[in-house]
Image (cartoon, rainbow, N blue to C red):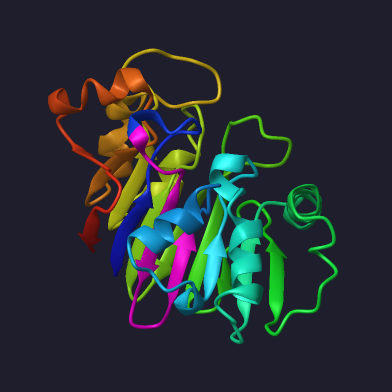
Amino acid sequence: MRLRFLGCGDAFGSGGRFNTCFHVTTDETAFLIDCGASSMIALRKFGVDPNAVASIFISHLHGDHFGGLPFFILDAQLVSRRTAPLVIAGPPGLEQRLAVTMEALFPGSTTVERRFALELIELAPGERRAVGGVTVTPHLVRHACGAPPFALRLESGGKVVTYTGDTEWTEALIPAAQDADLFIAEAYFHDRKIRHHLDWQSLAPHLPAIRAKRLILTHFSPDMLGRLGDLPVEAAEDGKIVEV
């Protein structure tokens, strides 16, 4: 498994970073974890062919995590001339929220005929499901976004990667990330505790129970960006490549 951080920033582009979008390739498939509003720009910058992406997994329905989907779909239709099927899997409410967003940004875009099949899958919390060459298990976390927010545990090519999505600390993160080959965790602040987001000091005491083989922190506030040099673990950055 090879993962590249195409975007690892917060909602506001702190530090000049793109919104959340991770590109994963295995022997079986290639997929994205989240597709924030700036993701098409990041795909172009880092030379990732969108037509080679078979599926997209969405953690939750906030614009910096799913807002790039209208652009991805329209690029596939109008620019990249996609013909291969595309599967997008995410929380309940995905289909309606995506349609509303597409119509708000590009009126009429939901009714135009496409050359490729688009399948939208709404995942049920805790239900392990095969999607293409990936097995995904969504774990319900704590982040207000108008629909169930997930931490995603994704298995492909004999490896496991878990992403917390956005969430304050919840015990659900332990089974979601337990023994994962790679655990990507939000750490919006170092020690400041706020609702709906995770800080490093709240996460750190639980790492022995999680037992992930590798941990990379992401989704930093300006305050956290100023502390990266003091962290005892890895930090994400746009363009960073991880071999799992």
Q: Which residues are magenta?
A: 16-33
- Pick out the residue farthest to the top: 192
Any magenta on residue 19? Answer: yes
* Percent position of residue 28, x then y: 40, 83
Most foreground residue, 17 or 136: 17
Numbered label tally:
0
Regarding residue 127, the answer to whether it shows in the image is no
Question: In the picture provided, is 241 more to the left or to the right than 10?
Answer: left
**Residue at image point 60% right, 49% down:** 66
* Percent position of residue 24, x then y: 37, 66
Question: In the picture provided, is 118 more to the left or to the right than 1?
Answer: right
* Percent position of residue 135, x then y: 50, 69
The image quadrant where one finds the N terminus is: bottom left
Any magenta on residue 37? Answer: no
The vertical placement of 42 against 143, above or below, is below
**Residue at image point 42% right, 74% down:** 49
Question: In the picture provided, is 17 more to the left or to the right than 138?
Answer: left
Where residue 30 sits, quadrant-wise, is bottom left
**Residue at image point 31% right, 59% down:** 4
* Percent position of residue 44, x then y: 41, 63
The image quadrant where one finds the C terminus is: bottom left
**Residue at image point 65% right, 44% down:** 61
Question: In the picture provided, is 12 more to the left or to the right than 89?
Answer: left
The vertical placement of 85 against 239, above or below, is below
Where residue 146 sits, quadrant-wise, is top right
The vertical placement of 87 against 139, above or below, is below
